[in-house]
Image: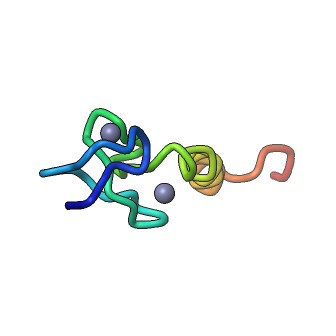
């Protein structure tokens, strides 16, 4: 059985980290913009989500 990469307990029906593919419990995973991330990838995911938003809004200060 796969174990959760956050808490280390076995996972029966979990989710996958969308960056590294680690198996996680639904309650252990962090969700950003509909994607699940492990603790390790959460920071990266948050950064990317911010970049994504910036791309949508356009870069401030350059009109
Ligand atoms: Zn867990
Ligand atoms: Zn990950």
- What is the x, y in percent for residue 52? 57, 54
- Who is closer to the viewer here, 29 or 7? 7
Q: In the image, what residue occupies the spot 34% across and 49% down? A: 4
Q: Is residue 21 left or right of residue 14?
A: right
Residue 9: which quarter of the image?
top left
Q: Residue furthest right?
A: 61
- Quick check: 18 above or below 36? below
Q: Residue furthest top?
A: 27
Q: How is the image coloured?
A: rainbow
- What is the x, y in percent for residue 39? 51, 43
- Quick check: 3 above or below 25? below
Q: In the image, what residue occupies the spot 42% across and 50% down? A: 5
Q: In the image, what residue occupies the spot 62% across and 52% down? A: 44
Quadrant of the snapshot with the N terminus: bottom left
Q: Residue furthest left?
A: 13
The number of numbered badges drawn on the structure is: 0
Dividing the image into four equal quarters, which quarter contains ligand 1?
top left
- Who is closer to the viewer here, 57 or 47? 47
Q: Is residue 44 left or right of residue 30?
A: right
- What is the x, y in percent for residue 57? 61, 48
Q: Is residue 20 left or right of residue 11?
A: right
Q: In the image, what residue occupies the spot 28% across and 33% down? A: 27
- What is the x, y in percent for residue 47? 65, 48
């Amino acid at each position: 059985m796969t174990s959760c990469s956050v808490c280390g307990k076995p996972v029966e029906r979990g989710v996958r980290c969308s960056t590294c593919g680690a198996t996680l419990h639904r309650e252990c995973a962090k969700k950003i913009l509909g994607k699940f991330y492990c603790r390790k990838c959460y920071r990266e995911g948050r950064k990317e989500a911010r970049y994504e938003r910036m791309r949508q809004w356009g870069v401030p200060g350059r009109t």
